[in-house]
Image (cartoon, grey):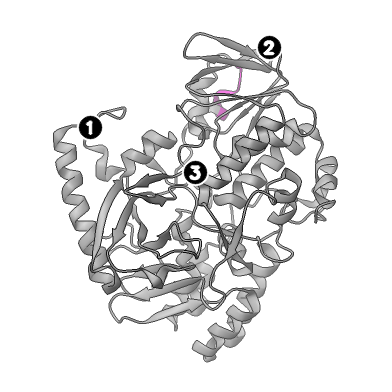
Amino acid sequence: MAYDAIIIGAGLAGLTSALLLARNGRKVLVVEQHHSPAPVVSGFERQGIYFDSGFHYAGGLGADGPLLPMLRYLGLADKLQLFPYDPTGFDSLRFADSGEEYCLPVGFANICNYLVEKFPAAATEIGIYLNEVASTWRNTPYLDLDVDFADFSMASVHGSSLQQRLEVFSPWPQLQSLLSMHCLLYGVAPDKAPLSLNAQVAGSYYHSAHGIVGGGRQLIKALLQLIGEAGVELQCNAEVVSIRAEKGTAAGVRLASGEEIFAPQVIATVNPVLLPELLPDAGLRPAYLKRLKKLRQTSSAYIVFGRSKQPLEFLRRRNMFVQPAADIFSGIESPLEQRPFYLAGADQDGNGTVTGLIGIVPAHYSEVESWGFAGKKRTEQYRSWKKEMTDRLVQMLRNNCPELSQLELLDLATPLTLRDYSRAPQGGIYGVARELGQYNPLPVTRLPGLFLAGQAVTVCGLMGTMVSSCLVCGSILGHEFLRGELKKWS
């Protein structure tokens, strides 16, 4: 079978890229190493509760939101039922030491009014800062369909960090916390996070915050139906061991089974750190391969999946960030019980009682590295350690949130889980970090015909992965053509 393009990885970026190409007449094959597509985004069930493991909520889906044209063009808008998060407080922040709690309302103007009310002496600086975020968060060619590609360049790796920018708010540490808490959702500390990164992630939520009825599972189900209708072929249990190159261009892939599949274009959605081992004979410059190998990853995490005997109404259509004390969000270097964390309700489409909990606590891979084994086989010593860690995490959540006094843990993902299921080196929860000073790879690689998609080339989340797919497919189909098609749906 002859293909125009082979896509490595059937996650959100891979399936979106496949649909974009197939909709425009390309014969596409998607290969996935797992036994089912999108194992991370699809989530799982425990004791009758559905847990999202790779999708929680999305920004930029409100009125005039930049993601809406993409969903409409792809055919997803008619297959997904969105629900808005609480407009009076989609994200809340609690300080464990004082019990103080703040809530961010939806919309830049509403957020500005709320923060000025809480911190009147900082009113001028609050307005300046939020205007900066509002004017920059969608400043990419596929979030702003009128941005001229000739004037666009990927975000600079130089400049001020988020922490440096927030120094102006040092008299108000609670405000610094509120404006830096979303770093937990992209895995880069404020002292290393570019302003543009925080603006893209936090700004999208400031604009609007929505969930999907059925969560990530429904999103993937809809994508699979659409790519099937578009004629895309999907092959699971198909691990790619090398990317073929002939005469200096990409030519296809070789699977672990020994099968070779040919196509003039290959889109890899794997972590770019893994690319050098897939390109043994591609003739790429050693300096380029060395740079890929040294890419720093985001922080890892412990992810708690639990159930409460009492309803978790404080998490209905909103999330909660918890920090030990007011300050710029950090703490990954702190002992476990002194780290900040993020809480979300599970399976919350607004129709039933919220009893499921997802908690994300930042972690270092070094905390599990000493176990020193590869693959998914676990030792008794590891299981004993995991039980101890489970008890500590549950107690930590209960101590900081009285609402979780009846929390029961159903499952726990550790950095090793993230390493094995998403092939994330060092268990990076959001893949390659977008840090100051680090040059992340572009969608178009130095090997003609080989492209990269996924959060490593843009930002994490639904918005980032969809934008990366558009950047890749626009490079193949023509950016002005693809943006023109999206404009028809705006």
Task: Where is residue 139? Give x, y as percent.
Answer: 71, 58
Q: Which residue is mark 2?
A: 1
Which of the marked residues, 3 or 2, is nearer the chain's N terminus? 2
Is 410 or 173 nearer to us in this picture? 410
Asked which secondary structure carries label 1, the reply is loop
CA neighbours of label 1 inside 10 A, class few (<14), some (14 to 19), many (20+): few
Q: Can see residue 200?
A: yes
In 3D space, how far apart are the residues under numbered discs 1 and 2 (Cα atoms)? Answer: 40 Å
**Relative vertical location of residue 26 with respect to residue 83 in this rendering, above or below:** above
In 3D space, how far apart are the residues under numbered discs 3 and 2 (Cα atoms)? Answer: 29 Å
**Would residue 141 be found to the left or right of residue 437 on screen?**
right
Task: Where is residue 372? Give x, y as percent.
Answer: 24, 31
Q: Which residue is mark 3?
A: 41
Q: Which residue is mark 1?
A: 378
Q: Which residues are magenta?
A: 282-288
The quadrant of the image that shows the C terminus is bottom right
CA neighbours of label 2 inside 10 A, class few (<14), some (14 to 19), many (20+): few
Asked which secondary structure carries label 2, the reply is loop
Is 334 or 396 nearer to us in this picture? 396
